[in-house]
Image (tube, rainbow, N blue to C red):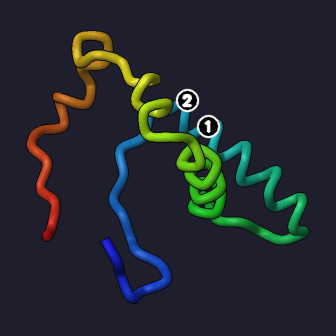
Amino acid sequence: MNHPRKLVRLNLHLRPDHLDRLTTLACALGRKKCRETRLAEAMELALTAGLSWEDDDLLSLTRSDREEPRWLALGPIVRPR
């Protein structure tokens, strides 16, 4: 998807341990940049690192729905086209 905007607002569901890790990363990023940083900056950094992997390598990390049923509990997915 190609969006003309530089930033897009998202409503996310995150695991608490992932949120803790992103918060820790945001704090470290803030110390490195000598300014306050948003959680989204840490998320962008993590996504940049993770998405540098090949899709097959990323997909090999996935767990079955039986192992992680929390995603099914969120209900149907509606993506704008």
Residue that badge 2 annotates: 17
Residue 36 left/right relative to 55: right
Where residue 68 sits, quadrant-wise, is top left
Where does the C terminus fall, quadrant-wise?
Answer: bottom left
Relative to 18, 10 lies left or right: left
Q: Amino acid at mark 2?
A: Asp
From the viewer's perspective, is 35 left or right of 60?
Answer: right
* 45 or 15: nearer the viewer: 45
Amino acid on which disc 1 is placed: Asp
| Residue 20: numbered disc | 1
| Residue at 55% from the left image edge and 29% from the top image edge | 17
Q: Position of residue 15 (x, y in %)?
A: 44, 33
Q: What residue is rendered at 33% in x and 59% in y?
A: 11
Q: Seen from this angle, which residue lies furthest top?
A: 66
Which secondary structure lies at badge 1? helix
| Residue toward you, 11 or 65 | 65
Disc count in the image?
A: 2
Q: Which mark is residue 71?
A: none
- Image coordinates for residue 61, horizontal then vertical, percent: 46, 23
Up the image or down, 12 lies above or below 79; here it is: above
Circles 2 and 1: CB distance less than 8 Å? yes
Q: Residue at 79% of width from left, 57% of height from top?
A: 29
Residue projecting furthest to the bottom: 4
Q: Residues within 10 Å of mark 2 (few under 14, many from 20)?
A: few
Q: Around disc 1, counting alpha carbons within 10 Å, would you say few (fewer than 14), some (14 to 19), or many (20 or more)?
A: few
Q: Nearer the viewer, residue 11 or 61?
A: 61
- For the N terminus, the quadrant is bottom left
Residue 53 image offset from top left, x and y in percent: 56, 41
